Each structure stands twice: as C-alpha cells, then as structure tokens.
Amino acid sequence: GFAGPEGRLENVVWPHDYLWHQVTVVVNKSGGYWSLYLDGKEVYSYKYDGALPNFAYLELASAQNEPVAVDELSIWNRSLPLSEIKTINLLDQPFNPYTWPEKQQKAKLARYWSFDENEGTSAKDAVASDDMTIDVNQWAIEGRNGSALDVGQNIDLALTDLPVTDVSLSFWWRNSSSPDEGRPNLILKNGDDIIMSLAPTIYNTKYNFNGFEDFLIEYNKSLLPNDNKWH
C-alpha cells in the first residue's frame, strides 16, 4: 500500500447510500505526499519521506471478497491539483464521450427465395442472382403460400457480393409430425468459419454465434411451438 500510518483511515467517512461517488487518489513523488479525494474534496493526505517506485502493475480486487462496483477507471500522467479534481467532479462527464453510430438507413431486401416453383432443380432468388440448386424431391407441396422447401438434404450457396455487415434473416418454419419434423439448420459462414447458425426444433433449438454454441431452452422446454402451424 501507500506510505502512511498503519491501520485504517478512521477519520474518512465513506458514504453508504447506493449512489455513485468519485474517488481520486493522487501520488506526488516530488512533493512527497499522497492524497485521497472523495467527490472533489480532499478527505486524507499524508506526507512521507523516501522514494516511491514506479508503478508497473494494476490490480482490481475486493478487500473482503465482497461485491464491489467500479466504473470509468482512469490514470493520469501526473498528479492532479485540487482545482482540476473539482472541475472533473463538477463536469460529471465521461472521459471518452459515447459517439452515436450513424442512423441506419431504411432496410433493403437483399435476397429472397419464395420456394413457389414446386418443380425443377432450382429455387430462384427474386432479388439478386443467387439461385439455389436443389434436388427435385425437395419440394413440399403444402407450403404457407404455395409450395415450400423440404430441407432433407444440405443446400450450400455462395452469396455473391452481399452488401451488408449487419444482417437480418427471416423465414417461415413449421413443425410436422414424425418423421417429417421441422429440424432445419441455417448456417451463415465466412469460408469454413461459422458466423451464425440456427437449428429450430421443438426439442433443443441449437444456435452458434461467432464460435459460441448453446441451446434456446427454458426450464428444459423448447421455446418453439409444437402445433404443426407455420410461424
């Protein structure tokens, strides 16, 4: 710890009001003192003889292994005088003000497959030219509107020049009775790396996001309905 009398700072009254308070510790090696400030006011100061070593390591810990909240930790390259500490406290502003991102533009449909062909080996992309090559037996006659796709076999599709970094993906899903249960697996990849995947099912819906894999369940129950209806 800092140089000073052994024991606790008995004369320092720490607030117990569940509010945020600014604590500042100043070490002045050339002046031979260190000081403690609370909400812009000096509450303790101690002069010492001798030299303090340079600081090269920072540790955050709880003194008694109890929960403690710390926010907006900052280190300055010199000791701050009381006037600057008061100014910082009165301004009550973060040192790195949050910059709001640019307002999102109106969403633009980038790809769309209706799966209404119900024949042949191609599902047309109505927006761009990323048509899916499918097996002729993958058409399911009873779709939500028209026909639908039976994802019984894998369909791999390279998306050409998809002009997005953020993305939203929507589709209609229906659970069916065994053996035609609704268990598709939609995967967005960059090369061989899985960026995001979702496998909706009435049992354990599995997802993967940027390498993290888990299940969407609540109290051991799937979050998806088992009613043979389109959702």
Image (tube, grey):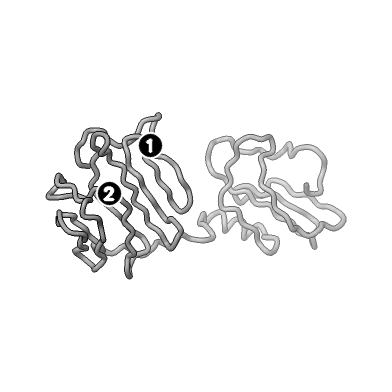
Q: Residue at x 69, y 40 (%)?
A: 12
Q: Earlier in the sequence, mark 1 or mark 2?
A: 2
**Residue 223 locus on image (x, y percent):** 33, 36
CA gap, disc 1 and disc 2? 18 Å
Q: Which mark is residue 123?
A: none
**Residue 60 locus on image (x, y percent):** 66, 47
Which secondary structure, mark 2? loop
Is 53 placed above or below 152 here?
below
Residue corresponding to mark 1: 204
Q: Where is the C terminus found, in terms of image quarters?
A: top left
Q: Which mark is residue 151?
A: 2
Q: Residue at x 80, y 63 (%)?
A: 30
Residue type beneath disc 2: Val
Query: In screen coordinates, is 63 left or right of 124?
Result: right
Q: Residue at x 14, y 44 (%)?
A: 142
Give the mark count.
Answer: 2
Res 169 quadrant in image: bottom left
The answer to whether the residue labelled 1 contacts the one labelled 2, judged by CB atoms less than 8 Å apart, is: no
